[in-house]
Amino acid sequence: MTLPLNADLHCHSVVSDGTLTPEALAARARANGVELWALTDHDEIGGQHRAMAAAKAEGMKYLTGTEISVSFAGQTVHIVGLGFDADHAGLRQGLARTRGGRGERAQEMSDGLAKVGIRDAYEGALRFVGNPELISRTHFARFLVETGVCKDTSEVFRKFLTEGKPGFVPHRWATLRDAVTWIGDAGGLAVIAHPARYGFTPNEEYALFTEFIAHGGRGVEVVTGSHSSQEAVTYAGMAREFGLAASRGSDFHSPDESRIDLGTLPSLPAELTPVWDLLADRIQ
Ligand code: AMP
Ligand code: MN
Ligand code: MN
Ligand code: MN
């Protein structure tokens, strides 16, 4: 029996809210035994050519990747795109539009934090930003840990950066239709990221899956750093029920913050079709 492929198709670099460069991530992935890798920065594909070259230098196979922020049923949902043409104009323009509101949102987040006595959070967060177009809540979280307001980033999210908390600013991201269409038009495959994270009602979740498929989406993350082993079982069942291929990815952001390292997740349940089986001709 051959061992299952060690694929890690979800992680973040300094091009979005990770702390490592694409090259450092590639080296870390390889050291952990990853055979097929994808860098999936939030709303950004500016690191793809570097990641591809680094994967090649490490002797790893590569799929292009991104993680698009989408507004759906009053929540933010993430759609991972894999195996697209990284130079596709429509995808590049769509992502640029999605990134567009982040600067203003960050100013408003900073205003909200100032009201509870946390000053200059915008400037503070900016010091952690690698890509000026991609200031995210994670950068604010790092600033609040550095200044000693909270002990770790999850405490910052809980106390300051989630719905109803002083640094939370609702934001309108891409539509589900747009995100899935951009990925498909660029020759890639769209995947629902970490579905257990959204806290949807069964009706809302059913709507997400059916609309995603109607727009051309074909995959769902089953084994991810954001799922418990029980949640992986639940979404393996959903993958079967909806006829979706399954993906696997750590969602690694930082050696200091991420619970799950690159390439260290359990394998996909054997009866599922891995997304990489549908992307054989897109693997570099
Ligand atoms: P944004 O795109 O600016 O809304 O930021 C979302 C990012 O924040 C996610 O991609 C995660 O990296 C991070 N994040 C969200 N929730 C949490 C949490 N509870 N603990 C730590 N990081 C989180
Ligand atoms: Mn992130
Ligand atoms: Mn995500
Ligand atoms: Mn992610």
Image: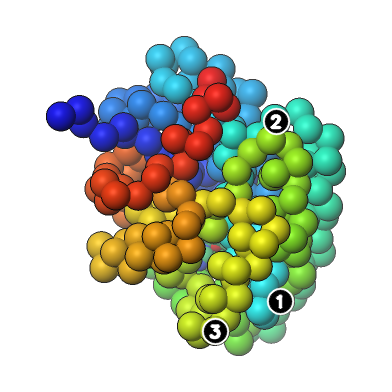
Report the quarter where the C terminus lies.
top right
Callout 3–callout 1 Cβ contact below 8 Å: no
Q: Identify the residue shown where x is 41% and y is 16%.
A: 58
Q: Which mark is residue 170?
A: 1
| Residue 249 place in picture, x, y as percent | 41, 46
Residue drawn 39% across the image and 45% down it: 273
Task: Kindly tell me whether residue 99 is visible in this rendering.
Answer: no
Work out how far the residue at label 2 is from the one at label 3, CA to CA, in angstroms.
35 Å
* Circles 2 and 3 in contact, beta carbons < 8 Å: no
Q: Is residue 112 left or right of residue 137?
A: right
Q: Residues within 10 Å of mark 3 (few under 14, many from 20)?
A: few
Label 1 environment density (alpha carbons within 10 Å; few <14, some 14–19, many ≥20): some
Quarter of the figure with residue 51: top right
CB at mark 3 closer than 8 A to ligand 3?
no
Q: Which mark is residue 86?
A: 2
* Frontmost residue, 100 versus 68: 68
Give the label, 1 or 2, closer to the camera. Answer: 2
> Coloured how?
rainbow
- Percent position of residue 200, x then y: 52, 80
Residue picked out by circle 3: 203
Quarter holding residue 152: bottom left
Q: Amino acid at mark 2?
A: Ala
Quarter-wise, where is residue 124 in the image?
Answer: bottom right
Q: Nearer the viewer, mark 3 or mark 1?
A: 3
The residue located at (39%, 60%) in the rendering is 240
- Which secondary structure lies at badge 3? helix
Question: From where the camera sits, is residue 222 visible?
Answer: yes
Relative side of 198 to 239, left or right? right
Residue found at the very far left of the displayed protein:
1
Q: Amino acid at mark 1?
A: Pro
Relative depth, front residue between 216 and 261: 216
